[in-house]
Image: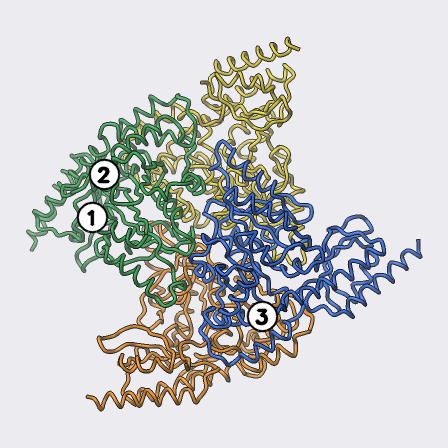
Chain colours: A green, B yellow, C orange, D blue
């Protein structure tokens, strides 16, 4: 079975493993107070071109979203997100479990607009009795989105501007951030993104690390006491150095972007090949997740050799599926997938 | 600096690292649904002599305590624990953050008694208006305790009996469980312990693993839907296999107990040497944490070469400190510590 | 100013006030453990034709919804409701504040269908990884709805059947229940409704009482320890007798339905008069809330003498507003409103 | 049965009932936005000599404590209170249900000291890893306490000073506030108290009202959005005017203090009579709750005619009980109680 079902099918980049081995018997303090974490924090601050940013390491995405959001909202506030946002659908109500509503706005492709944010804000404050409703308290987006789509720099700027104007902290979930930054039509750097939000995180789990997400807090008001939140929400790893060592490795010489680039290149091979054969896609994704619309018969055949994610049926004969590439995807497997799909499509055409 | 301040100063046992390397490019499903997790679950069930036990892997201790406790209690219930229990003092209110009171009972040495549990239960139900008070809903202990002390099999039996009698699930926090099982006066096996509670966990973070705790659910009523709780509380690791691989390694040929034994042996060297020199201890600990009462002057000197934890002052001239050993503690460091303390004590005696 | 903006503009039915006076210096136990509460509970059980029902008195609607829902759901479960459901939009996230998601389904008129419930249930359990999503844990509807519409007995039966089939407790918010039971096309009695759900409440605040809602628990599994929930959520009134006395008065000789009937009659006068004049309505409401679509100019004029609720704009020239009647609505005020609207409509027609 | 078991055995002061009747058919806006609430707010501000205070009306004590505390604390903070504080023992974990620990400090008589607050604060911030513990976030006391005891002005000043110094909002639970202000050794006015805290509430339920507590927020930082909190926590009464009317009546011409005085006078009759007969008390209470230590035989006899609260056994032959008086206590009942106890004591002495 060759797996394209997600971007966390393998372990970690070998350089990370090597570093874990070489540092294994070092004795360090716990809970992120060690030299590796310090260095990783420093490298990330440099990459963000912000020497004052606070950087914290957590273990996983749901945990990170919950911790950041719960640290920001007042008890009667909610977080604005796309209906398809990870926090809205795939975290088993983790946000609600901390007492907060996810205020969803509709989205076709996983993205939301500054106009939507403004509309939610205005609707609330124009209500004759706003205190009977959840108050919008912050804005959440994913870059790239859960659908592989990506915000342009101008779109982020517009979202950040409207958030500022409304007094709403703007949080970017970067579980797959590298795959956006490495995409061929990306018009921003990590530093650009760090200038266009109040807090975001850099995903490690899906990009080369065993596990780990680096939260970067830009807004001074959101900085105090964040470690209390991490500890309470179960994210303060005893051997915090494990996260430090991994992010150190990912950020000391560009490894993070380098392996992200590989994943995107692999995804584009699949994408371009399918386009060539006239296949259309549910979402226009320039990143590591591809959502082609394919004949059910073809998919049925494919399943014997490849794993991928069923997304939705679009007609009696066709479905959308998701193929993910990652830092670990091997070129030969991609070639094989392309070949097998191509072959199957040709056979189908021949039948008609 | 030689570190004795805690039992998570190093990385992982080398066999675990080797296994991570050898499995690194295997492609597996996420979230604990892979062959390594399956095998680890099976090995743990065998070690517990309970083929029906549910086994789940989480990342850290606070997360595990929170997830287990929140999965058991009804909204108006609390968990009975020692005033010194980890959940009562060192988890930043994680239990309260899920809506539940920690109902503390006093303890001199970290242990609680079945009589104390019964008394809390009776006091509640004998109240004329119990519904104005938090209802006791379960019992929490640590084995060994945060003070290094240990429950005997008879004590566990008594706690389990009274819990059953009161209808209270009995949960054992085993963050350092190996260090209890390997202690020289331990009168129980892992399988014994698994027969004497409703749910417990086997700590990996402090005993050889990079991170990871294995929750073992014995009581059928507590089994359904536990994965929802893990996901919501941020403990469902995307690359769940990392936990599976580690527990597989720890349990396939007795490594867990073997390295626990080493830690306890090292602790006993320190303990016996100090006893020989007339030093007394705050707690009578047969496990990897030792709490000697030492002269402040000596401690001041020791700090230049060793790290350890200040516990409390007991007089104008003496303090209690904590020395921890672990699976990774090196004999030569222990010898050096013993020698330096011994030397200092002799100097002090000479002065008098 | 003549007020039609809501159904809680006045105090209480005079018989309730008289009873409060006549019982004022009686000495009773607190917290609902008094003879008045006992008698009220008994009268409600009789009206529900269910001698085993548990009846509890709480103070307000948001409190009641929160207490009931939080008492039922497991931490990872959510409650299915219409997007327009009171708990979804007008309770400042009270449900989320207890840790639970409101799983909304679209609704044009405030009602949801058994098919919608089934679809949510099936979608969850057919998911390949349901534990990543909030589990549907119960069903919430309002009878009548927030839009004045009403479920028929067959619709309730279908909802109850599907809920049973899915193992989801079915909860009916009856903040305005009397106004449904008294409506001219109501095909059910209170006892019928009590046979078609697991738990519901009978609203007092909007129907004759100073305040107070009577929760009726039919399902034995939902009965234990409910008083703990009431106390914790702040609903256990010290002078519980106040609620007992009021529900005693409302239920001892049919007062509840009698005054509900009056409100509906008043609403129908408005409704029928507007229909006669060709006015259409946003919702087809047979209860005490009416949502006519009226010219903005007319509404502007009306505002100098009457208060009512702006609902939404439907065109450049027309808006929907809400008129509420209640047990306290005076016929002469209704006549005056009808006359003034009629007069204004005629004037507008004359202009055209 | 003559009841002395609590201070909410009767309905409301007759002037309040009269006012409810005379205003009953007035039409007002809901949720506390009416002229009665406005006037009551204004009267309370005058009594507090603070024109900028925010005044809000809630229904009950547990609800009020929960709402105020949850509005102040950050998610990782707890509230410092006496072990005997109402929030620590008699609210079914309502505070914990909003996510917060009650950090208890020991108390013999229900009072806590500024030194205790300072010690908790210092212990937290001197900890090497404070983020592993709940951060003290505010201070809660009751005036008078649950044991009838009272803080002097100097004690309040010291608590307020230390709270300020530590940056901890200081909250006074005044469920029985009138009974403190009216006590014979009270050295403060309502206005004094309002100068010595950040927020407090004036209890109505136990002093003349049917129900209702008036929260007074002095500290500007605690004022924004408090109505959202009230709504979410179920305390925003639809017919808010009911609370306005009651507090208007209590504060327009001194009724609140006048009826508090009566309760204290009645309590002092009991107190002085028992002292005269050599009876000692568990707490030195100058307010409406008295805790005498009496022979069990005597108490057994007394129970046939009087209700009172068993507090605790102090020896094989004696127990502490609680007698409460209130605004509604009748002199003849007090005389009768005193006579019966006196008679019984004399009989017992004669036996010896």
Residue D68 location (% of width, % of height): 51, 55
Q: Residues within 10 Å of mark 1 (few under 14, many from 20)?
A: many
Up-down relation of residue C175 to residue D275 (above or below): below
Which residue corresponds to the image point at 23% horizontal and 78% vertical from the top-left? C317
Q: Residues within 10 Å of mark 2 (few under 14, many from 20)?
A: some
Residue B104 location (% of width, % of height): 60, 43
Q: Along the horizontal axis of the image, is B108 left or right of B330?
A: right
Q: Do the residues marked 3 and 2 share a common chain? A: no
Tell me the chain of label 3: D
Q: Quadrant of residue C142?
A: bottom left
Q: Along the horizontal axis of the image, is B293 left or right of C197?
A: right
Up-down relation of residue A1 to residue C343 (above or below): above
Tell me the chain of label 2: A
Mark 1–mark 3 Cα distance, whole angstroms, equals 61 Å
Which residue corresponds to the image point at 60% horizontal and 34% vertical from the top-left? B110
Classify mark 2: helix, strand or loop: helix
Query: In this figure, which residue is indicated by the disc labeled 2?
Result: A190
Residue B20 location (% of width, % of height): 33, 29
Query: In this figure, which residue is indicated by the disc labeled 3?
Result: D252
Q: Along the horizontal axis of the image, is A74 left or right of D18?
A: left
Label annotation for residue C310: none
Residue B186 location (% of width, % of height): 59, 28
Viewer-side label of 3, 2 = 3
Residue closest to the eye, B312 or C42: B312
Query: In this figure, which residue is indicated by the disc labeled 1?
Result: A151
Q: How many marks?
A: 3
Classify mark 3: helix, strand or loop: helix
Q: Do the residues marked 2 and 1 share a common chain? A: yes
Viewer-side label of 1, 3 = 3
Q: Is residue C286 visible?
A: yes
Classify mark 1: helix, strand or loop: loop
């Amino acid at each position: 079975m060759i797996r394209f079902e997600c971007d966390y099918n393998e372990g970690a980049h070998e350089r990370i493993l090597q570093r874990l081995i070489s540092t294994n018997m070092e004795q360090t303090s716990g809970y992120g107070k060690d030299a590796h974490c310090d260095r990783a924090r420093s490298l990330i601050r440099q990459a963000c071109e912000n020497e004052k940013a606070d950087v914290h390491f957590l273990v996983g995405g749901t945990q990170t979203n919950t911790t950041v959001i719960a640290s920001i909202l007042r008890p009667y506030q909610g977080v604005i997100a796309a209906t398809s946002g990870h926090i809205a659908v795939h975290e088993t109500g983790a946000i609600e479990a901390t007492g907060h509503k996810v205020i969803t706005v509709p989205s076709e492709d996983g993205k939301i607009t500054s106009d939507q944010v403004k509309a939610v804000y205005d609707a609330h404050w124009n209500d004759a009795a706003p205190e009977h409703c959840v108050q919008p308290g912050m804005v959440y987006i994913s870059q790239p989105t859960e659908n592989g789509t990506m915000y342009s720099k101008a779109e982020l700027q517009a979202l950040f501007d409207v958030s500022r104007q409304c007094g709403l902290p703007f949080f970017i979930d970067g579980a797959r951030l590298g795959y956006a930054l490495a995409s061929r039509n990306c018009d921003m750097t990590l530093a650009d993104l760090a200038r266009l939000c109040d807090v975001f995180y850099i995903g490690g789990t899906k990009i080369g690390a065993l596990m780990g997400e680096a939260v970067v807090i830009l807004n001074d008001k959101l900085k105090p006491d964040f470690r209390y939140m991490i500890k309470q929400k179960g994210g303060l790893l005893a051997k915090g150095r494990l996260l430090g060592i991994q992010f150190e490795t990912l950020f000391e010489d560009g490894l993070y972007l380098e392996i992200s680039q590989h994943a995107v290149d692999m995804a584009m091979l699949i994408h371009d090949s399918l386009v060539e054969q006239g296949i259309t896609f549910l979402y226009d994704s320039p990143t590591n997740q591809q959502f082609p619309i394919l004949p059910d018969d073809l998919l049925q055949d494919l399943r014997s050799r490849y794993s991928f994610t069923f997304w939705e049926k679009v007609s009696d004969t066709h479905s959308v599926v998701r193929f993910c590439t990652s830092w670990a995807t091997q070129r030969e497997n991609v070639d094989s997938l392309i070949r097998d799909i191509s072959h199957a499509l040709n056979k189908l055409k021949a039948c008609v």
